[in-house]
Amino acid sequence: MVTQSVIVLWLASDTWFGGDDWHYILFRGTVPKADMGLLEPWGGHWQATIILIYRALIATVGLQSHVPYLVVIMVAHLFVTLFTWLILRRHGIRPWTATVIAWLVLFYGSGAQAFASTGPMPLTVGMAVGLGALLVWLHGEGSRRTALAAAALLVLGVMTSAAGVVACLLVAMVVYFRKGVRAAALVAGPAFVAFGTWYAVQGRDAGRIHVAGWSWTDLPEFAFKGVTAALGEPIAMPATGGFVLLAVILCCLLLRGVGEDLRILALCGIMAAFAQMTLSGLGALSLDLDPASQSRYLYLSFILMAPALGLVLDGLSTVAAGRIAGSPGLVQLVRGVALLALLAYTLVGLQGVRRDVDLETAIANVYKSWAYGSAAGVLSGQKVLSPHPDVPLFEAHDMTLMTEPEVLDLLPPRSVDQQWRVDDDNQFFTKVGEEVPGLFNPVLIGGEGFTTQFRAQPGCKDYTAQALSDPLITLGTGQQGVEIGVVSESTTVTTTITREGVTSSAKTWSVEPGPIYVSTTARDAVLRVSFNGDGDFSICHQ
């Protein structure tokens, strides 16, 4: 387990703070005026536990390194693995079988996002807490003291994420089928009451569940695809997941010599996996997400089905051992094949880790460029004009908060890539629209693609753009920022910023024909503005 953790942390060492991280940084205490508190949902989840973890990390290590944050989710993953092994052993699964299942969980590369990146921390921690509650209850089954301890852990779990709610459901089913409704109510009741109260008061307005674009009949298909993918993806044969699931269910029902408690746990785990995927579908279907592509969901489903897999592996290996016991050579062959299969699974799992880490690194690098590029702009005296990125799924990010002093003080010092700087100047410190930012300062202005020579004198002047050309206006920004007013029939405007020979990526703005204002606070740069329309233009400037 330690070796796996070291490998994953090494692979993920180049990641940085991504989307979910920045939600906790910006909206959960670092910037007092934007603090949403402990009860406001995020991503449809109640995440009070995670918010407290982030507050503690930010207070102690700040943003100096992403590794401490990764350590938290890795520790949660290790606890999930350990608790899985202990739960299987307590149900009579042989040590080597429990170890194999725990190994499958440990190196579950199809769900690597859940332990190699910090975004899914609420899900992984919630599941770890829930499995811990089950283990506590099993340790003192029938004891009121352990029942209350398990209940406390389940309350903590539902305050972590919906994965904690599903884990609570699993524990409730196991206790109910083994001890009855009163015992189940004692263990799981407080958590369900706490979550239900939170949902009624605060959580139902989370905005994560959108029925538009899909129907309720899509949920069963989503859940089935997700659960079967959790079984088929690890062996690189997703299409076989349905057959594997059917075989597992039949074995859980029909294998002889299986303890009743283990059978109950296995079947409850399968039902909980379907419940998990159903809950995930409520949020994912509105985004048109394929369940097989969401490795965090596959991870949760695989963990929930681990007892069933342990039952099947233990039962079938017992039958096989009885049949080949008289052939030592065949026994050695089977063991060798099993070890090779486990090695292949491990290597495939590490490839999955690398794949998810590469994706998370690419996303985090976008945030790093935004953080440092915008910080350089604000520290040079520029003002954010367009606070929200125009990148899909990132629109809710607020650059005005990212450039607050409380956040800038947390960033470790580093040199700023000039490409980051001009890209951020064009995306966040430039604006095109109907609003007037009030930056009508003297400007050096030029134009191309017009039938008459461009005049630099202040005031409003009329021009005619050449046919079949995209007229271009260039503005020298100086030290105070600049703004021009334009009236035209254009429907798109494209801007770029150039400073010291480095030109930003282009940004395209959709506009209505008529009057608009183009402005930027970028200093000592050249703003190029092109229009998609020809015909008459009226341009006003100082």
Image (spheres, rainbow, N blue to C red):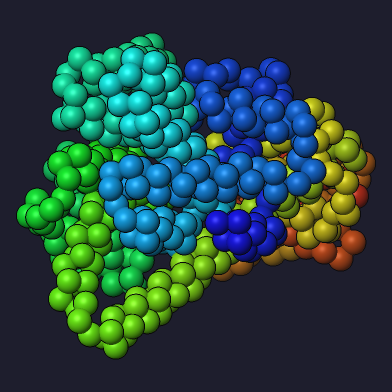
**Position of residue 28 measured from the top left corner of the image (x, y, whole percent):** 62, 25
Quadrant assignment, res 334: bottom left
- What's the residue at 48%, 73% (across, down)? 347
**Position of residue 395 measured from the top left corner of the image (x, y, whole percent):** 54, 41
**Position of residue 445 measured from the top left corner of the image (x, y, whole percent):** 83, 51
Q: Is residue 403 visible?
A: no
Q: Is residue 96 left or right of residue 539?
A: left
Residue that protrudes farthest toward the bottom in the picture: 329
- What's the residue at 34%, 15% (across, down)? 144
Q: Looking at the rendering, in which quadrant would you find the N terminus? A: bottom right
In front here: 280 or 259?
259
Q: Is residue 117 left or right of residue 429?
A: left
Q: Looking at the rendering, in which quadrant would you find the C terminus? A: top right
In front here: 400 or 96?
96
- What's the residue at 40%, 49% (across, down)? 85
Q: Is residue 94 left or right of residue 5?
A: left
In front here: 442 or 90?
90
Relative vertical location of residue 34 with respect to residue 484 in this rendering, above or below = above
Quadrant assignment, res 215: top left
**Position of residue 189 measured from the top left corner of the image (x, y, whole percent):** 29, 16
Relative vertical location of residue 298 with respect to residue 203 in this rendering, above or below = below
